[in-house]
């Protein structure tokens, strides 16, 4: 009998094999399931077909054992907030990380093939996706996350383990696709991140950060 779930976890958090691991490996030999790198996560091809991307969020959650959301360029592309892309879209995800767990060790994240994965503190993630955790960010939130992550990285602000900026938005990508509402929505999303931080972005105002980041002198230039 073939595996049932679309995404299957073969390793526990401590690296030990789960029950049925040898059975899963056997089905790998039949090309019925394929591993997602060395993460211990397998895709069931009878459920996923050729489109693994739609099951990637579940795979990343299983690989990290953490709360995860999708972010980045693909979201803005689907919402038509970007110019047509000349290169391949890279899936981007954020996972909650912290400086210490019950043993006092900072969170680490696995290297996952074919995607970009970055850490965000709990307060940042809750600001982006709400307490219930929307799996895919609103375009304004995804853009705000990208901008504020770049600002933090450029200023040497490290808010959590595995923190990093993925896609760096450019004016040329957004030019002609933004209007006053999308700009206002992005400002509001950025300000929510700024206000949620108790020390990292003190005194920052979203419109000023936005204008400085894109090197524009007025909203009409974008």
Image (cartoon, grey):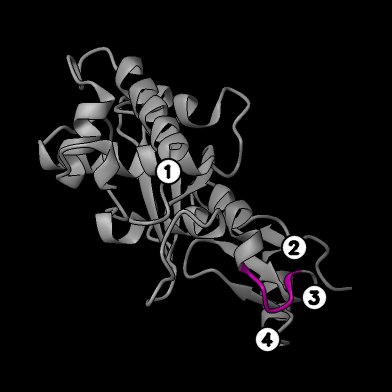
Q: Do the numbered discs 3 and 1 sit on residues whose CB atoms are within 8 Å?
A: no
Residue 6's disc is 2
Q: Residue at x 68, y 86 (%)?
A: 29
Residue segment shown in magenta: 48-52
**Mark 4 and mark 2: span between their CA atoms?**
17 Å
Q: Quadrant of residue 103?
A: top left
- Viewer-nearest residue: 128 or 104: 128
Mark closer to the chain start, 3 or 1: 3
Residue 46's disc is 3
**Mark 3 and mark 2: span between their CA atoms?**
8 Å
**Mark 4 and mark 1: span between their CA atoms?**
52 Å
The residue labelled by disc 1 is: 179
**Mark 3 and mark 1: span between their CA atoms?**
43 Å
What percent of the width, then of the height, locates residue 46?
Answer: 80, 75
**Mark 4 and mark 3: span between their CA atoms?**
14 Å
Sort mark 3 into few (<14), some (14-19) or many (20+) by Cα contacts within 10 Å.
some
Mark closer to the chain start, 3 or 2: 2
Q: Residue at x 37, y 37 (%)?
A: 144
Q: Secondary structure at mark 2?
A: loop
Residue 78 seen in this snapshot: yes
Q: Do the numbered discs 2 and 1 sit on residues whose CB atoms are within 8 Å?
A: no
Mark closer to the chain start, 4 or 2: 2
Against 135, is 88 above or below? below
Query: Is residue 74 located in the magenta-colored stretch of the structure?
Result: no
Sort mark 2 into few (<14), some (14-19) or many (20+) by Cα contacts within 10 Å.
some
Q: Secondary structure at mark 4?
A: helix
The residue labelled by disc 4 is: 29
Q: Residue at x 30, y 31 (%)?
A: 105
Q: Indicate left or right for 175 with 152 as reference.
A: right
Residue 165's disc is none
């Amino acid at each position: 009998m073939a595996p049932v779930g679309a995404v299957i976890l073969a390793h526990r958090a401590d690296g030990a094999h789960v029950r049925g691991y040898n059975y899963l490996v056997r089905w790998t030999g039949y090309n019925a399931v394929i591993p997602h790198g060395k993460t211990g996560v397998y895709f069931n091809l009878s459920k996923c077909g050729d489109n693994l991307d739609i099951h990637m969020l579940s795979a990343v959650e299983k690989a990290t054992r953490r709360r995860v959301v999708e972010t980045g360029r693909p979201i803005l592309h689907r919402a038509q907030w970007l110019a047509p892309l000349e290169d391949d879209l890279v899936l981007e995800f954020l996972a909650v990380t912290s400086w210490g767990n019950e043993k006092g060790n900072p969170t680490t994240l696995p290297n996952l093939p074919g995607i970009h994965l970055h850490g965000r503190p709990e307060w940042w993630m809750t600001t982006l996706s709400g307490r219930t955790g929307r799996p895919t960010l609103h375009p304004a939130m995804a853009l705000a996350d990208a901008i504020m992550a770049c600002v933090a990285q450029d200023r040497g602000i490290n808010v959590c383990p595995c923190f990093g900026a993925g896609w760096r938005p450019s004016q040329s990508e957004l030019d002609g696709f933004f209007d006053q509402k999308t700009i206002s929505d992005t400002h509001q999303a950025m300000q929510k991140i700024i206000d949620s931080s108790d020390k990292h972005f003190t005194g920052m105002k979203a419109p000023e950060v936005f204008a400085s980041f894109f090197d524009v002198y007025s909203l009409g230039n974008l």
